[in-house]
Image (tube, helix red, strand yellow):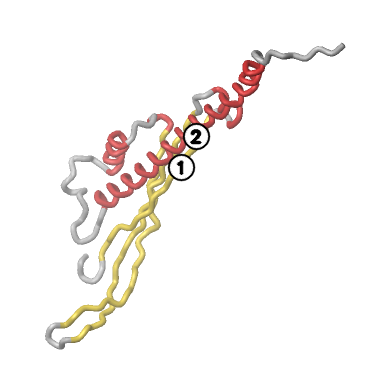
Amino acid sequence: MRRSIKSEEGYSLVEFALILPIMIIILGLIFDIGRAVHTKTNLQHLAGEIQKVVVLYEEAGAKGGIKGYSNYRDRDELVNKVIDENTSLDRDKLTHRISSEGVKSRRYIGHHYNLESGQFVSTENRNDIEYITAIVEYNMPYYIFVTRLILGDSIKLSESYTGLMYVGGDGWD
């Protein structure tokens, strides 16, 4: 004789027990990957800010930069202040580098309107520029145990920002 089970009260508890580990894994990954995305965005902002203040501090163009008027002893002191004010990341896990490709001369044809002749005049112009790159790296540890098991203890995030600095040219030196 066959008996059939008529009560299904325990099935939902068993299903929940089977789904719970998968949900914990997914939530842990979402939490730590969300932190990584937030940290990467923070690094992008920080790299841009560092590059900007280095150019303002060092610029050797017509104005001579703010180096002569600054209260900072050197560029590194200014960069450290920018890092302190623009991020809440752990400074022990944060590194930065500033690199330069050297001065390059750019030649181009400039056009301007001559009021006396009533025509556009072309002149050859020159700009001397220097590309400055700020590189910021951060070793972000994972907080969730499950994420550490799957992805390892930490992830190294890096961001760089390159911009140019006007050095001189065409009598503006």
Residue 106: x percent and y percent?
34, 69
What residue sits right under mark 1 in the picture? 158
Residue 52: x percent and y percent?
29, 49
Q: Disc 2 marks which amino acid?
A: Ile
Residue sitting at x 58%, y 32%? 151
Residue 42: x percent and y percent?
38, 39
Within the image, what quadrant is residue 76 found in? top left
Q: Nearer the viewer, residue 3 or 146?
A: 3
34 displayed left or right of 66: right
Within the image, what quadrant is residue 35 found in? top left
Q: Nearer the viewer, residue 167 or 37?
A: 37
| Above/below status of 134 relative to 88 | below
Disc marking residue 33: 2
Residue 58: x percent and y percent?
26, 51
Local SS, label 2: helix
Residue sitting at x 52%, y 24%? 144
Residue sitting at x 38%, y 53%? 162
Disc marking residue 56: none
Local SS, label 1: strand
Q: Nearer the viewer, residue 2 or 135?
A: 2
Mark nearer the viewer, 1 or 2: 2
Q: CA distance from mark 1 to mark 2?
A: 15 Å
97 displayed left or right of 66: right
Q: Disc 1 marks which amino acid?
A: Ser
Query: In the rendered structure, which disc, 1 or 2, sits on the residue that comes first in sequence?
Result: 2
Which class describes the residues within 10 Å of circle 1: few (<14), some (14-19), or many (20+)? some
Which class describes the residues within 10 Å of circle 2: few (<14), some (14-19), or many (20+)? some
Q: Nearer the viewer, residue 135 or 86?
A: 86
